[in-house]
Image (cartoon, rainbow, N blue to C red):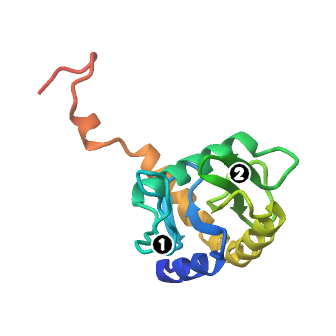
Amino acid sequence: MLILPKLHAYLTQLLSPGIHTALLLTPEGALVSFASDPCLVSPTAEGEATPTHPQSRSKDEIRIVAGLSAEVWAETRGGEAEAGMVESELGRILVLPIEEGANEDQDPLLLLALNASPDVDWDLLQVKAKKLANYLAPSVNKHRGQFATAASTTASTPSKARSNAASPNRPSR
């Protein structure tokens, strides 16, 4: 079973100097859980760091990293590399699928994304991400059938607003 507090604890274990954000998200970019280094220093208006006022990333910044991570995954999946990697103004972002046995016909249920400063080695990011992804994969894959059933039920059930609306071939009530 996937328990959110435990997922947060696992993501927190990935954080280290240089690796400041870890996210668990869907391939569509929906955020499941995240951990951010509370000692992340935000620059002042003059561009200087203020170590006396450490802050975590804002929820909006986390959502931006999640969206960018989903985009990186969409652009790089199916390629030779098993991870999507990009260097941006937010730092280095590495995205890995959480799955047992890569199946190119199916999207992974979840992605793991790490966001680090530009001086962190890509190999270190991959080693840390792969270790957690391999650990979580059996638990995530146990739920694949439940997620697939829920998704197909949701897709086949019309919304209440749509079902009550008048269509061109049906008289309004």
Q: Which residue, as the protein is rendered here, is positioned at the far left?
A: 173
- Give the x, y percent position of residue 47: 49, 53
Which of the pair 3/12 is nearer the observer?
12
Residue at 62%, 43% in the rendered image: 71
Quickly name the residue at label 2.
Answer: 106
- Counting from the top left corner in percent of width and height, residue 11 is at 59, 75
Inspect the image, locate mark 2, and give the three-letter code of the amino acid beneath it.
Gln
**Figure label count:** 2
Callout 1 amino acid: Pro
Residue at the disc numbered 1: 51
The residue at the point 71 percent across, 71 percent down is 133
**Residue placed at 69% from the left, 55% from the top?**
92
Q: Is the residue 166 above or below the residue 52 in the image? A: above
Kindly state the secondary structure of the residue where label 2 is placed.
loop
| Number of residues whose C-alpha sits closer than 10 Å to that of mark 1, classed few (under 14), some (14–19) or many (20 or more) | few
Q: In whole angstroms, how far apart are the C-alphas of marks 2 and 1?
A: 45 Å
- Image location (x, y in percent) of residue 126: 79, 65
| Residue 2 seen in the current view | no
Check the image and name the residue furthest to the right: 80
Left or right of 122 on screen, residue 168: left
Residue 49 position within the rendered picture, expressed as x and y whole percent measured from the top left = 50, 63
